[in-house]
Image (cartoon, coloured by chain):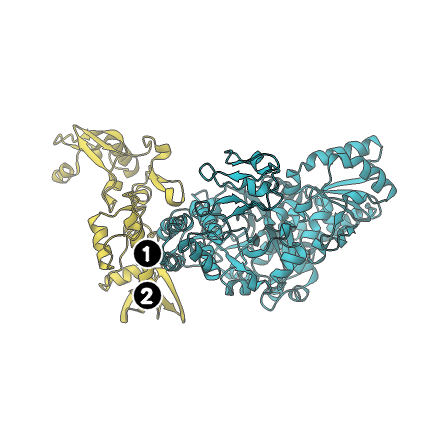
Chain colours: A cyan, B yellow
Amino acid sequence: MKKLESVAELKSLREKLVAGRDPQKPCVVICAGTGCLAYGVMALIDRFKKELKKRNLLDTVDIRSSGCPGFCERGPLVVVHPRKIFYQRVSLKDVNEIIDETVLKGSVIDRLLYKDTATGENVVTEDEVPFYKKQMRLLLEMNALIDPTLIEDYLTLGGYGALGKVLSGMKPQAIIEQISKSGLRGRGGGGFQTGWKWESTRAAAGEPKYVICNADEGDPGAFMDRSLLEGNPHSIIEGMVIGAYAIGSSRGYIYVRNEYPLAVANAVIAVEKARELGLLGKNILGSGFDFDIRINRGGGAFVCGESSALFASIEGRVGEPRQKYTHATDRGLYDKPTCLNNVETWANVPLIINKGADWYASIGTEKSKGTKIFSLVGKINNTGLVEVPMGITLREIVYEIGGGVPKGRKFKAIQTGGPSGGCIPEKYLDMPVDFDELTKIGSMMGSGGMIVMDDRSCMVDVAKYFLKFLEEESCGKCTPCREGVKQMRIILDRITEGKGDEKDIELLEWMGQGIIDGSLCALGGSAPNPVLTTIRYFRDEYMAHIRDKKCPAGVCKALISFSVNKDACTGCTACAKVCPTRAATGEKKKVHTINQETCIKCGACYDACKFDAIQVK
Amino acid sequence: MADTVTLTIDGREIKAPAGTTILEAAKNANILIPNLCHNEELAPYGACRMCMVEITHKKRVRLVVSCIAEVSEGLQVKTDTDGVRRVRTLVMHLILARNPSHPELQRMAAELGIGTTMFGVDFKGCIMCGQCVRVCREVVGASAIGFKSRGPSRAIATPFDESPEDCIACGSCHYICPVGVIPMEEHDGVRRIWKTDFPMAKCKTCGRYFATEKEVAFYRTIAKLPDDAFDTCVHCRSVKK
């Protein structure tokens, strides 16, 4: 495509693209996000193309591989436009039927529809899916409407319109005012005022100034930033160009972990396409403003999401945090003024410029504005990405969007804020979700991971899991984080083995505070959180491990035993079939037994039994 | 001259040039703040966390490492609050779990009222102050050793644990190590460090071995002195004058 020389040329290109699109033309949209790719969606896309070609339909039917719309639980997802008929768990054998029945005749295939778990009724169109209905998908909605590798798709939907607006005479100061007024806060975890960051970087002395997108998301179970960068990279690039223009920067970086191959690939394509069109590079849209982006791949250290470690990594040094009592906005990358924002923060920028700060500020709570994307995982029916307005309650997220806890089990806790966040018990489910409320109860917003736990999750074991993760991901530079987190984990090991002491709880609390106060960076500074919040809200469970030598959730192997409930066992032999050590035995249709000597407590029998006859004590 | 600022440390009013660290200002006023990774010859590092102090600046109270945080006008510093003691005590116990026996560490522990560590000892010797790595990079300029791994497995190592190619066997790491865990020995014209033998050069005047051959070659390239400047040992060079 030809390089665009002015905002007017951008507008006419968009008009041309829009005119070339028939909204009534059938289009098969297939999610090609990482979750669905894992389901084998590439083969599905190929099959659709092959079958359409066979029927000579390639000109009359569009096919689009889109980014992740969020409903990973029900993938592979196929939506047939223009009616937006929503099919889930689609497999290769469904392809012919979808083309012949739905694309050509417009009739609906009941078998592939999503069944509302609450009402038991089939849901026909995408907009009616309860999982989506309760959400406010300002960012994620775009993911499903575009092919991330095609800049044309983004342009057609008004993409780079905010940049056009900015370059048509908005003063940098006015842009910063809009961002400040919108109340946008950093989505990476800190919740820092974005407008303040921009303003400080702009005002700071030193050249050049840098603008960086932090895409080093590494929390276990979190994939919000990944899906945005994979599904809509141009929204992030557009946000960065606007930010750079406001700040007065000519050089930007996207720091993305190399474990996100699709995000890297799509970001690379997007940057190239934007450069080709003159939306990046010298003299952007003829405005005289120069700005370019370099993509820096991270080597997978969790700590590189921390600002000073991220800078070190870009500079080619070992990714370790550096203590400094100055802001990155004054001295960041190469000791120059640097504005580092998270993927989701950048993606919000074009929205705010397009729709206005007042509109944005009308969404959310008093001090947390706009929407937030959470990755909802764990013991939840609808695993996936959810985008909700700030201030929604945890209960709405878990039950109305997430569909509650599977198999009718009891909700126990929700872990928010990533590995160094906290576990929130049921009594706080009606609390509004925003930056400050979560902090108040000892957890945090973090980057937006949400892990749901049911009554089969042991909170001591959960705390141990996160601590182990942080112990391994600590860079090892400062003593409290390197040694302290390890020693806390050793104490938890002891407790889960039934060798704990009552004084251990007090000791963990004392150490936790010491590590928080003493650590060099935010990794150590928040590492004890999972332990501290589980002690705060689930002290009884710790005491059960320590005093009674019991694990109430039936998780800690040293403290549990599996046995057969004679009254419930039907002698179906399911337990004996799955037992890896042949500890579970018995004759057909007779009560089975478990040999405690040879049982390795793997729990396979428990999962296999259909009659709840296996007891965990 | 730099501007002078006035601050208080533990209630004492002190004047210090702007840009000085709190640790330095305290030391100049004979207030000693314990530390393990600080060395005046090296850039501030802030890793051991022993030198934490509590500061009040513009009504905001927080804990900072005094080896990096700088003095400012009106700053109030307290070197012995509950928060400071908690961090210091924790760090000391954690360090002792790596090295319970070094006399200097024991002395520092005793000052905090600690006899033995509350944690199980996993003897490593090295306390990860990083002075060896930093002196090699910042002062010598060889960058022959570095850190490997992360988390509790972080350790000082030569590249790939092999004989260090860039090491000149100057011994700076050996001398700077506060707990003496980098061995170096010398006999029969050979200096051994990092499990590697380095042949030594003889002084052309007195005939004594005075430096390793790699050291001499290294200094020659950076010193820009006459070619024969490193033919003799430091002693003979000063006598000649």
Q: Earlier in the sequence, mark 1 or mark 2?
A: 2
Q: Is residue B238 left or right of residue B39?
A: left
Considering depth in this image, is A574 or A29 the residue closer to the camera?
A: A574
- Dot 1 amino acid type: Leu
- Dot 2 amino acid type: Asp
Q: Which residue is mark 1?
A: B90
- The image shows residue A132, relative to residue B63, as above or below, that is above
Q: Quadrant of the N terminus of chain B?
A: bottom left
Quarter of the view holding residue B12: bottom left
Element at label 2:
helix
Residue at 44% x, 58% y is A532
Quarter of the view holding residue A506: bottom left
Q: Mark 1, residues whose alpha carbon is within 10 Å: few (<14), some, or many (≥20)?
A: many
Rendered image: mark on residue A402 = none
- The image shows residue B211, relative to residue A398, as above or below, that is above
In the rendered structure, the residue with mark 1 lies on which chain? B
Q: Which residue is mark 2?
A: B82
Residue at 58% x, 45% y is A613
Same chain under badges 1 and 2? The reply is: yes
- The image shows residue A309, relative to residue B67, as above or below, that is above
Q: Quadrant of the C terminus of chain B?
A: top left
Residue A340 location, x and y as percent?
A: 53, 54
In the rendered structure, the residue with mark 2 lies on which chain? B
